[in-house]
Image (cartoon, rainbow, N blue to C red):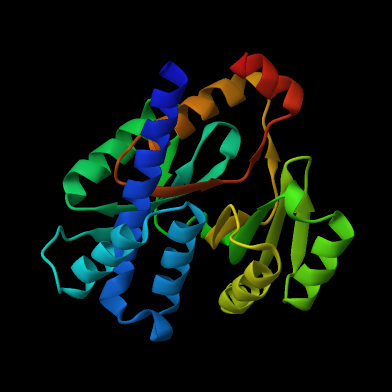
Amino acid sequence: MHRKGAQDKKRAKLFSRLIREITVAAQGGLADKNPRLRAAVAAAQAANMPKDTIERAIRRGSGAEEGESYTEIRYEGYGPGGVAIIVETLTDNRNRTAAEMRAAFSKNGGNLAETGSVAHAFARVGSMVFAAAVADADTMFEAALQAGAEDIETSDLGYEIFCNSDAFHAMRDALAAHFGTPESAGLIWRPQSLIEVDEEKAAILLKLMDALDNSDDVQSVAANYDISDAVLNRLTA
């Protein structure tokens, strides 16, 4: 029961973030002429969000239905060990969100910086994740390259496929036709390189990442750290 409760809470937080993104994206017009809305809907579909929930968020964003109004704010800063961090938020209260971000960074060994100060350490790219069971590596690599992928990372759990942000929608449609709905799909901040973090700094950094993730206003967090499996296992044991 405890495990199910935790899973339900995680799912509710994910849906809340997706609904906010769809609502804001829908302000830019209909999906056929709105790449951001297409990406938001694709992410919601990948998370198995009900169709009527997606449509309701679109109606609120387009003004056809009353709802909350959100402002986009991007925060950038540094964590322990000089790790670069980008936090994307959607908020209905700028002061509350700013205070939460300052507190999260300052209490966990980090500091906020000016917008644009760390973005150079990342690339804005399209990302899709498929489970390992959908295809063998050769089949996935061939299909991904034909669809316009620029890089593919594999693990025991599956495949993460990256492409230029402008090619994301075409790649998503092509791969979804081959392998079905991906586990996740959207535009992300991908680190250009990674900073290795030792165990002492990693312990503080993970607390900072948890503090950011626990904010209801945070949509996504990107960071360029590398924590070894051995260190991570000790910290999460």
Q: Where does residue 214 sit, x and y in percent of width and height?
A: 37, 34
**Residue 116 in view:** no
Q: Where does residue 125 sit, x and y in percent of width and height?
A: 60, 66
In the image shown, does 26 or 87 lie closer to the viewer?
A: 26
Q: Where does residue 211 sit, x and y in percent of width and height?
A: 39, 31
In the image shown, does 71 or 147 lie closer to the viewer?
A: 147
Corner quadrant of residue 237: top right
Q: Is residue 80 above or below residue 149?
A: above
* Residue drawn at x 51%, y 36% as measured from the top left: 79
Q: Where does residue 155 sit, x and y in percent of width and height?
A: 78, 43
**Residue 8 in view:** yes
Q: Is residue 79 above or below residue 114?
A: above
In the image shown, does 196 or 126 lie closer to the viewer?
A: 126
From the image, which quarter does the N terminus lie in?
top left
- In the picture, measured across the screen, residue 90 lies left or right of residue 4, that is left
- In the picture, measured across the screen, residue 66 lies left or right of residue 38, that is left
* Residue drawn at x 48%, y 34% as measured from the top left: 209
* Residue drawn at x 37%, y 25% as measured from the top left: 107
- In the picture, measured across the screen, residue 16 lies left or right of residue 222, that is left
* Residue drawn at x 58%, y 73% as measured from the top left: 165
In the image shown, does 232 or 55 lie closer to the viewer?
A: 55
